[in-house]
Image (tube, rainbow, N blue to C red):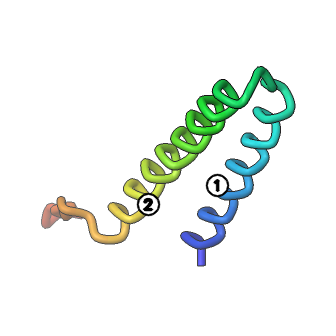
């Protein structure tokens, strides 16, 4: 549940950022394509970083070792 909700949040943020870039930085078709590509790439990279960290917590590689006194 949490994975899908946060993925949708990233999609919405990416769409909003793309619209803002399109409105604020309207300098021609070539520049618009560059700006949208950068925004989409940044959104995907941030989502991938979050997804890797989130999924890594589900099955950690290092298991904590408890001492006998605790």
Seen as rendered, the residue at the extreme top is 27
Residue 7 placement: quadrant: bottom right
The residue lying at 44 percent from left, 60 percent from top is: 54
Residue 11 placement: quadrant: bottom right
Judge from the rendering whether residue 39 lies leftward or rightward of residue 12; answer left or right. left
Label 1: few (<14), some or many (≥20) within 10 Å?
some
* Residue ID for mark 1: 10
Query: Which-is-in-front pick, marks 1 and 2?
Result: 1
- Asked whether 47 or 57 is in front, the reply is 47
- Asked whether 50 or 17 is in front, the reply is 17
Judge from the rendering whether residue 70 lies leftward or rightward of residue 57; answer left or right. left
The residue lying at 62 percent from left, 63 percent from top is: 6
Label 2: few (<14), some or many (≥20) within 10 Å?
few
- Disc 1 from disc 2: Cα separation: 14 Å
Tell me the quarter of the image containing the C terminus.
bottom left
Answer with mark 1 or mark 2, whichever residue precedes in sequence.
Answer: 1
Q: Position of residue 3 (x, y in %)?
A: 54, 70
Up/down of 64 relative to 34, above or below: below
Judge from the rendering whether residue 15 lies leftward or rightward of residue 54; answer left or right. right
- Asked whether 68 or 11 is in front, the reply is 11
Tell me the quarter of the image containing the N terminus.
bottom right
* Residue ID for mark 2: 54
Up/down of 20 relative to 52, above or below: above
Seen as rendered, the residue at the extreme front is 29
The residue lying at 59 percent from left, 44 percent from top is: 40
The residue lying at 38 percent from left, 65 percent from top is: 55
Q: Label 1: state its secondary structure.
A: helix
Seen as rendered, the residue at the extreme bottom is 1
Number of numbered discs overlaid on the protein picture: 2
Q: Label 2: state its secondary structure.
A: helix
Judge from the rendering whether residue 53 lies leftward or rightward of residue 66; answer left or right. right
């Amino acid at each position: 549940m949490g994975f899908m909700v946060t993925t949708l949040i990233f999609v919405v943020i990416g769409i909003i950022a793309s619209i803002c870039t399109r409105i604020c930085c309207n300098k021609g078709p070539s520049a618009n394509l560059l700006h949208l590509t950068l925004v989409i790439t940044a959104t995907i990279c941030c989502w991938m970083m979050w997804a890797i960290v989130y999924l890594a917590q589900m099955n950690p590689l290092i298991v904590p070792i408890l001492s006998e006194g605790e």
